[in-house]
Image: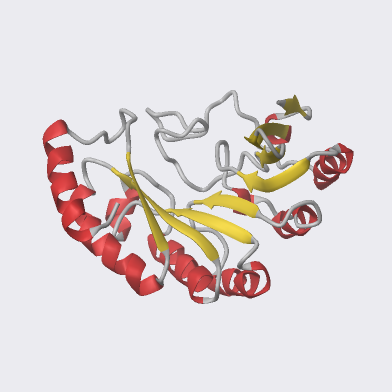
Amino acid sequence: MENAGSICGTVYLYQINTYIMKHAFDFALTTYCQAKCRSCARTNEHTGEKEEWLPLQHMSLDTFKNILSKTKLDISYIQFCGEFGDPFMHPQVNEFILESLKHTSKVHINTNGGLRQPDWYAELAKKHGREIRIKFGVDGADHDTNWLYREGVDWQRAMDNMTAWFKNGGSGAWHFLVFDWNWFQVPEIIQRANDIGCKLDIKINKRSWGKITPENEREFWKLAHEHYEF
């Protein structure tokens, strides 16, 4: 791991294949986020506000270019994670994407989906939909349910953005976290994903905030296997 002088400059390097020595870079582009997800590293679980130790900042595009220009590694993909902020909060995210595609043919991005507008996603999908993989974190079949974890996210905008991305040729997945308050919505989530035409990744939340009870988890698996092929 190389630290470029700030949290936003933190770079994680992964070795993907031992035999052909492919690698991946994971960049935290920003610490800005509109969401107040209580289990997120940037969020105080009790107040929902940003942790005081975390400064608000965007990674410098020059720093990003400098890191990539110095590597001689064969890069399998570059990822923009959402560990401390949503990548689409960065005002220069377009430039980061284009710069990444000079060094690799694959860019992975994690987002809560509620930032920017459908037209932006549609245009990006038409240009780079096969090269960019976006994982949309949406955890409810309606605004109120999604808000229970992803407080601050406009659910309808997230759904519109996700739909625009996949309907225009974008690749990636809908990432659905199962909580004690949304497990019964799985059949509707599966139907919505089919309507949009996107892959659905379902994952059980294992953190304390909203953790599903053992009884409800058993019911969830029964319901899920009736509607979803794992």
Q: Is residue 119 left or right of residue 199?
A: right
Residue 114: x and y in percent read 49, 58
Q: Nearer the viewer, residue 61 or 176?
A: 176
Q: Is residue 71 left or right of residue 167?
A: right
Residue 40: x and y in percent read 46, 34
Q: Quadrant of residue 66?
A: top right
Q: Nearer the viewer, residue 8 or 184?
A: 184
Q: Residue at x 45, y 62 (%)?
A: 158
Residue 190: x and y in percent read 28, 62
What kind of colouring is applied to the model shown? secondary structure
Q: Residue at x 59, y 51 (%)?
A: 109
Q: Quadrant of residue 216?
A: top left
Label total for image: 0
Q: Nearer the viewer, residue 216 or 91?
A: 216
Q: Residue at x 27, y 36 (%)?
A: 210
Assign the N terminus to one quadrant of the image: top right
Q: Is residue 166 left or right of residue 78?
A: left
Residue 167: x and y in percent read 49, 75
